[in-house]
Image (cartoon, rainbow, N blue to C red):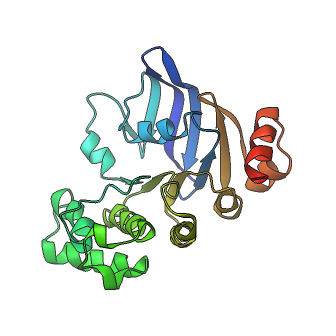
Amino acid sequence: MAAIIEMKGVIKRFGTFVALDGVDLTVEEGEIVVVIGPSGSGKSTLIRCVNQLEEHSEGSIVVDGHAVARGADLGAIRAEIGMVFQSFNLFPHMSVLRNVALAPVRVRGLSWPEAEARAQRLLARVGLESQAGKYPAQLSGGQQQRVGIARALAMEPKVLLFDEPTSALDPEMVGEVLDVMQELAKTGVTMVVVTHEMGFARKVADRVVFMDAGRIVEQGAPAALFDAPSDSRLRNFLNAVLTH
């Protein structure tokens, strides 16, 4: 399988603070990679650098053969990367259907009828076909996040990035979003997921990456990582999150 994301020696500084400290990470096409770690470990910064929502300070990032850097055609690169945010980021003045259809019209050049037909199919896929005419404020948090997933899929991206997609949700709504993500993982799309949901990581990931202090400390298959962690920082982290 070919690598679709390659990060080599990636450093990201915010002033004097080093958020990413020499990260090397390769993600294969069709792979489900789940990134875990304590707050402030660099997880969200890592995936935000992939589509240059944060510009990395040093090192190289290549997505689907295209170097991601200042001066690159970021619009073309981002068109291949779907992003699902923690805080939904839906347009409040647009219907659910328009939220999902907008980017394919603006970026891919689809007609509105084509884009709306695609949006309807995707809303059905995430269980929200009956909500197409509503506005985001009329939906629950879990429903809004499922719209966010449909919107990311509408661009037919090669990579889907999830930045703690359930952390802003009430506990009873987490399952409905994870169920949709679990179904997506079976379709062959490449996914990089930052999450605190260890059950999801164990069940769905091909590989789990543990970060601490801006570095990848340990990575491997879920069973190996969760059942026999070799690094003491990972053991401590798992003890803390799995006993609460």
* Residue 225 in the figure: left or right of residue 174: right
Residue sitting at the far top:
16
Q: Position of residue 56 (x, y in %)?
A: 42, 27
Taking 36 as reference, is 126 above or below it? below
Question: 123 or 93: nearer the eye?
Answer: 93
Quadrant in which the N terminus is drawn: bottom right
* Residue 64 in the figure: left or right of residue 101: right
What's the residue at 86%, 47% (across, down)? 228
Question: 106 or 214: nearer the eye?
Answer: 214
Q: Is residue 86 visible?
A: yes
Q: Position of residue 87 (x, y in %)?
A: 40, 53
Q: Is residue 182 visible?
A: no
Looking at the rendered structure, the number of numbered marks drawn on it comes to 0
Taking 29 as reference, is 36 above or below it? above
**Residue 97 image-quadrant placement:** bottom left
Q: Position of residue 11 (x, y in %)?
A: 50, 23
What's the residue at 47%, 42% (across, down)? 47
Question: 113 or 132: nearer the eye?
Answer: 132
